[in-house]
Amino acid sequence: MRVPAIDINGVWFSYDKTPVLEDVTLTLRQGDFLGILGPNGGGKTTLLKLLLGMLKPDKGTIRILGEAPHDANHRVGYVPQNTNFNTTFPISVMDVALMGRLSRSRIGKWYSGDDRAKVQDALKKAGIWDLRHNPIGRLSGGQRQRVFIARALATEPEILFLDEPTASVDPEFEIDLFDFLRELNRKVTIVAITHDVGVISRHVKSVACVNRSLIFHEEGQITREMIDMAYHCPVDLIAHGIPHRVLPTHTET
Amino acid sequence: MWEALQLDFMRNALFAGLLVSISCGIIGSLVVVNRIVFISGGIAHAAFGGIGLAFFLGFSPSLGAALFAVGVSMIIGVVSFKSKHRADTIIGVLWAIGMALGIILIDLTPGYHVDLMSYLFGSILTVPGSDIWLMILLNMAILITVISFYKEFIAMSYDEEFAFVVGIPVKLLYFVLLGMTALSVVMTIQVVGLILVIALLTIPPYIAEKCTTSLGKMMVLSSILGIFFTLGGLWLSYSYNLTSGATIILVAGVTFFLFQAIDLIRGH
């Protein structure tokens, strides 16, 4: 059996004394498409930062493709939540995407022709090759999002992490994006944080819900328990817009 | 002007202006995009403590300034990681303490009257030949460092979080940047003085940033603008018998406002 894409075991984390995550355990197989749901401040982004090695757990272990998070960072891609920063920075789309080719082992060397070829490929996949010479600040929110996806793809990741990929993007692009991600998912494990239950329900293979603790559902079902945990009070919005596939089958006991 | 070039001190002044413009163009660009202008101001002023110490103990003021500048830059580096939210306060404190310490040490130096003005406002006309060689060395060190780690510096400056995630030693790079800033500041003190350093470090990159689409081009254009400001200022100060450092900064300042005005008109 292949090594799991993500293996989180009994992870606890707190900022100063404020607990954020408690006893989180999750094993994600390679090739999965995980959606992470949860309320704001529930610890979604903290969990992502732990997975990327930006934070260290107080307790417990995290393995990414069998390695410590900071050692696996050349095998994962990361699309941040906010792509709307530093918009006056003098940098072209191409140069932002090239950052995906950075790695610890090649510090002090310039980008190679091979790097450029891979970035070209990534920019074409994301549909923004024509914009490569534009300054990043002149792009629309959706276009900029694609640049950051291209940057993540340029790493040739085995796992792609996205933090609220639809946060600053027009709805049309949102549908586009998830079709694109589903296509990509044939080869790449994908983990997407989102607060949008509808999006998750339509596209992902498995669902986790984080609100200090974590519930994981491998079949991609959003259970009542998750919704309750995610939004504190029972929500009836699951009746709207969510295909039946994700609704738990009602079993009489 | 041409007969002036026959004079040794004038030639040195020209070279000093050229070299400082290049280092300020490169480092200033990094300072501006990393938003550490206030830090570079703090370093420049705190360096005066080193100048005072050098007079008190009787060694080279440039060396004193360099030691203090690098030392303070490292302290600021540590502070900006450890207590992010009060970093600016601590920079302000170091800024003032450095100045005060410098003045007191000069007070305590027996029988020695230092020309304070030349440190505060520069003395490009008294740059000795040996300092020119030092500036050439420093410029080369800065150039080699920035060219070697160009893509890492861009990554750190544009998206520090991502740079960290992909394994770039962001903290180390930040300290290297602060160290290079400190050394450029010491060089620049010679030319425009420690009070005016910030202007030469920020005005050329600020203008250049708006006209370029890469950090490298921004650095080149800043250096060219800096050369234009220092040589233009030097020529004006020679022709009209004005303080050179202040004239250089005012040439830069006038260009800055002209550029802002053009930008404003174009924007509407």
Image (cartoon, rainbow, N blue to C red):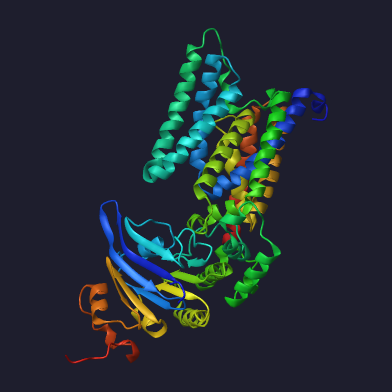
Q: Is residue A243 visible?
A: no
Residue A232 x/y as whole percent: 22, 72
Residue A96 x/y as whole percent: 58, 63
Residue A162 x/y as whole percent: 45, 70
Relative height, residue B64 to residue A45 (above, below)? above
Residue positioned 67% across, 69% down in the render: A117
Q: How many marks?
A: 0
Q: Residue furthest top?
A: B111
Who is closer to the viewer here, A229 or B129?
A229
Residue positioned 42% across, 40% down in the render: B79
Residue positioned 45% across, 23% down in the render: B100
Quadrant the C terminus of chain A occupies: bottom left
Please identify the quarter of the rendering in which residue A151 is found.
bottom right
Relative height, residue B139 to residue A16 (above, below)? above
Classify residue B159 as left or right of residue B126.
Answer: left
Classify residue B139 as left or right of residue A147.
Answer: right
Quadrant the N terminus of chain A occupies: bottom left
Please identify the quarter of the rendering in which residue B194 is found.
top right
Who is closer to the viewer here, B6 or A235?
A235
Residue positioned 59% across, 29% down in the render: B193
Residue A46 x/y as whole percent: 36, 62
Relative height, residue B37 to residue B189 (above, below)? below
Q: Residue furthest left?
A: A253
Classify residue B194 as left or right of residue B94.
Answer: right
Classify residue B160 as left or right of residue B138.
Answer: left
Q: Is residue B180 visible?
A: yes
